[in-house]
Amino acid sequence: MARKIIAGNWKMNLLHHEALELVQKVGNYCQQTELNKVEVIVAPTFLDLAAAAYLTKGANLSIAAQNCSEHKQGAFTGEVSLDMIKSAQVNMVIIGHSERRQFFGDTEEVVHTKLQKALSARMIPILCIGESLEDRKSGNHEKIVKQQLQSALRGRAAENLTELIIAYEPVWAIGTGETASPAQAQEMHHFIRKQLNEMYDEAMAARTSILYGGSVKPSNAAELFSQPDINGGLIGGASLKYEDFVSLIEIGKKELR
Ligand code: 13P
């Protein structure tokens, strides 16, 4: 059974005090509510990571980093290593987000290296994959997603991937207000699971959580989360508002299987 997950990617939003206030509110909610096996994750910026982990200790809320360096340590100004993230009591990391791929030179090789290092460091990776509008229009979306998946996971055996989380985020649906239709999302999630089955085996494919990301909001979440191959959401904009994020968790509790 795949884990049911509602994750908020805060991206470069919220000032320090705002981030800590929100993480504490979400943490309190998670502590006081029966989550029906839905796991909740939030990913603040590096600046707020350690404090967020400290403030929500024992709260049934996991904290994730939005990125990590592919280097272990040393003269890499501005970078943050996996060991540093771990030392802040954070054991999850988003890898290969399309904004990193688009704006910060995270090539498929870089994404591969970061993923391998995160796995070796026993961190839980949230691997993001997804096609551009151009790929979708030209009918290459499955080919691109398959390539991203194969390239990132290359060389890893199924037993190393027991906690892997995948997020399918079509680039054309991120922050645009345009969502993949539930049918489009289900079709791609099913395709991804089929690839995992071919690359590994049925058990690995069945237990891997595949989250959908791209303009998920309370008004469209129920239809998306009720699709059989969608195990949760990776949410940007709507995760910044406490009421919206909590209502997405509530929808997840009802709809995710
Ligand atoms: P939005 O929900 O703002 O479209 O962002 C999705 C995303 O990129 C999450 O990682």
Image (cartoon, grey):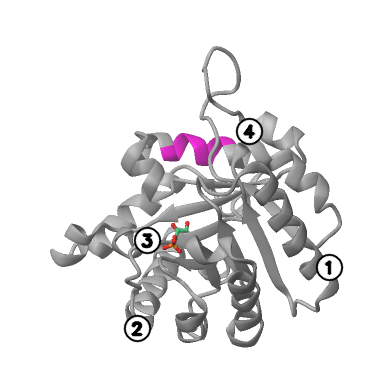
Looking at the rendered structure, the number of numbered marks drawn on it comes to 4
Taking depth in this image into account, of 9 and 4 the one nearest to the observer is: 9
Q: Which residues are magenta?
A: 111-117
The local crowd at label 1, few if under 14, some if 14 to 19, many if 20 or more residues have their Cα within 10 Å, is some
Q: Quadrant of ligand 1?
A: bottom left
Q: Is residue 151 left or right of residue 63?
A: left
- Residue plotted at (44% across, 69% down): 193
Instruction: Name the disc covering residue 183, or none.
Output: 2
Residue 89: quarter of image: top right
Q: Callout 3: helix, strand or loop?
A: loop
Residue 203: quarter of image: bottom right
Q: Is residue 50 left or right of residue 161?
A: right
- Residue plotted at (49% across, 52% down): 127
Disc 3/disc 4 C-alpha distance (Å) = 26 Å
Q: Callout 4: helix, strand or loop?
A: helix
The local crowd at label 4, few if under 14, some if 14 to 19, many if 20 or more residues have their Cα within 10 Å, is many
